[in-house]
Image (cartoon, rainbow, N blue to C red):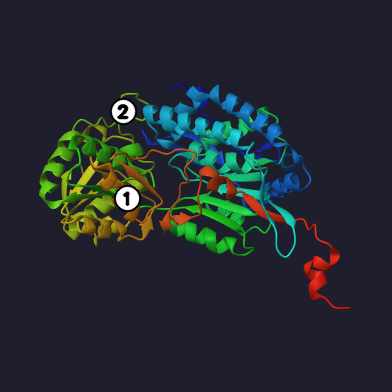
Amino acid sequence: MSDAVLPEISRNYIDGEWVETGERRTLINPSTGEPNGESCEADVALTERAVAAARRAFDDGPWSRWTPEERCEVLKDVVDHLMERTDDLVDIEAANAGATKRTGSIVHVGIALSNFDHYAEAALTPMQEALPPTENPYFAPKWVVREPLGVCAGIVPWNVPLLMAIWKVAPALAMGNTVVLKPAPATPMSVQVLAGAFDACGLPPGVFNLVLGDAVPGEALASSPDVDKISFTGSTPVGKRVMQLAASNVKKVTLELGGKSANILLDDADLDVAIDGSIFGFTFHSGQFCESGTRLLVPEHLHDEVVERLRDRLGSVVIGSAEDWDTDLGPLISQAQLDRVAGYVDLGCEEGAKVVAGGRRPPHLDAGGYFYEPTVLAGVDNSMRVAQEEIFGPVLCVIPYRKVDDAIAIANDSPYGLAGGVFSEDVTAAVEVARRVRAGTLWVNDWHLGVMDAPFGGYKQSGLGREHGRQGLEEFCETKAIHVSQARPEQRLFGMMMSG
């Protein structure tokens, strides 16, 4: 990788201008633990300046008044610009977010740009639809009109910075809104390229704004009376805080929060498929995905065989630098996250679980970087903290069950409900089980598959609202009903109800 592709200083972007500040944060390469850049962080005043720019651009500027075709054309130009930077973006996501080259090229960048293209096309979504006319007490045609909300703030996590930014920004812009984006403080590099693409492609000033930092700009956005919508992805405790602050002006909120997803192996599961699928479910991006399958529910009579197969298969997983194409499992994002994961494994052992694979830093990578072996805990009871709390690392809890009803009860015995999975050769039976699991996305004989035309979001403390699909677009719209009376004066309600 050429160091030239990494932004030396990540800056704020406000009202069409790059803005540096004196408040700096050192950015760390997770594969080495060494610094690889700085970011300029925003305070409350600079955040308010970004919101004011977005407010002016929405209220007075052209974007919300442009035709869908005009917005689509600009967004398509942004996609083309980003496509030209694909290799740079893959390098950036490896060096800044710890995404392996394969994961980065396929998901962090490849799917991200495909998603942006999808939302550019979504700008052409009809914003008006006719309803059947009212017939009684008089004839009145009526329509549903979808209008942009106004200023939308997006707050994104560190695990997939570019993809999550696009999930917030692209649908908001496609629907005619203006945006203020706040990336996670540790991973601002790839959104620098995104902001640069908007700048290069002629997005009007103030339509897209970028503020960097931690809780200070985040809380300012969530509480601002000039922000009409918050779209947040991150932990459940922080999501609760965002929701609390957003209540100050009853702004619209979408929250995609934590998960502790259950993966149910039925008796007839093809174990060759199920083992690989289960490993992918909890190790993808080193387990740093909210919908990771971190609870594996296994029939009692298959428990020992499944554990042995998991241990054997994990032995072939290549752990190493995110910047090496041959790496299967890269680093965790930070020393703090490494300590968190290791602490949960220790806690699981204290609770009575047994480490049957992993449970340590890889000996050959002990000198630098935030690496942790994919870890399997057996003998886990669902009441244990390791089975109830989100670890956000490559740790799998294997939980035995006796009957399918027991498995479903265990799966639903969680404060979360983001995702789940079922492995079985009987698709009909698997789908029936999937329907009984209280979670927003269920996979059968697969994991992590996400598509833009299907809604994504959680039950319970996994979130509020949906991203993607028609449902996700409507999260960035206000809905208005228009009724047109064609009645004679004496037929109208006010003619019948008012005297004199």
- Say above or below: 221 vs 156: below
The residue that label 1 is drawn on is 434
Q: From the top left corner, tell me how far across and down residue 117 is, in percent.
A: 56, 31
Of labels 2 and 1, earlier in sequence is 2
Disc 2 on helix, strand or loop?
loop
Name the amino acid, label 1: Ala
Does 484 sit left or right of 463 as displayed? right
Q: From the top left corner, tell me how far across and down residue 27 is, in percent.
A: 47, 38
Considering the image in quadrants, where does the N terminus appear?
top left
| Viewer-proximal residue among 71 and 387 | 71
Q: Between tags 2 and 1, which lies in front?
A: 1
Q: Residue at x 27, y 38 (%)?
A: 277
The CA span between labels 2 and 1 is: 33 Å
Considering the image in quadrants, where does the C terminus appear?
bottom right
Q: Is residue 404 visible?
A: yes
The residue that label 2 is drawn on is 327
Name the amino acid, label 2: Thr
